[in-house]
Image: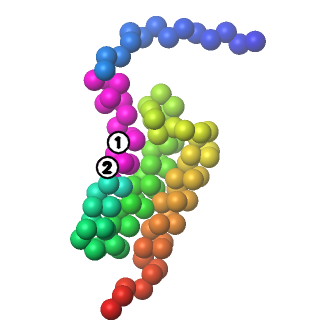
Amino acid sequence: MTDQVPDTRPPKNWLQQILGQWPLAAVLLGVFVGLVIAVPFGHWRIGCTLIGASATAGGLLRLMPQQRVGLLAVRSRLIDTTLLLGTGLGILVLAWVIPPSR
């Protein structure tokens, strides 16, 4: 059985804990801005591109070490990265393959 080394770092205060969640906040902010552009303003291609780019960036951010990625880590690194990259690239492809309406 392996012995785990206790963490000797001091505990983080609440501000450090909140700022440590920047990968998830960046992805959610990109998706939110994409929705704001797509839904009320009707620029669906730009909004969907931003949403797809945010999900793809989330997949790339998930490759960071476990201690840095925060709440963006839900499952194993392989599954999270595969799902986020697949979803993001799928949204990007669909946003640019669908012909514009006249």
Q: Amino acid at mark 1?
A: Ala
Categorize mark 2 by other alpha carbons within 10 Å: few (<14), some (14-19), many (20+). some
> Which residue is found at the position 31% from the left and 16% from the top?
13
Amino acid type indicated by mark 2: Leu
Residue 29 painted magenta: yes
Region of the chain picked out in magenta, as a range: 15-30
| Outermost residue toward the right in this view | 1
State the SS at label 1.
helix
| Principal secondary structure, stretch drawn in magenta | helix
Q: Is residue 37 magenta?
A: no
* Residue bearing mark 2: 29
Which residue is located at x 57 percent, y 53 percent? 83
Asked if residue 88 lies left or right of residue 80, the reply is left
Secondary element under disc 2, as helix, strand or loop, is helix
Instruction: Say if 57 sits above or below 19 in the image.
Output: below
Spot occupied by residue 14 in the image (x, y as percentages of width and height): 31, 20
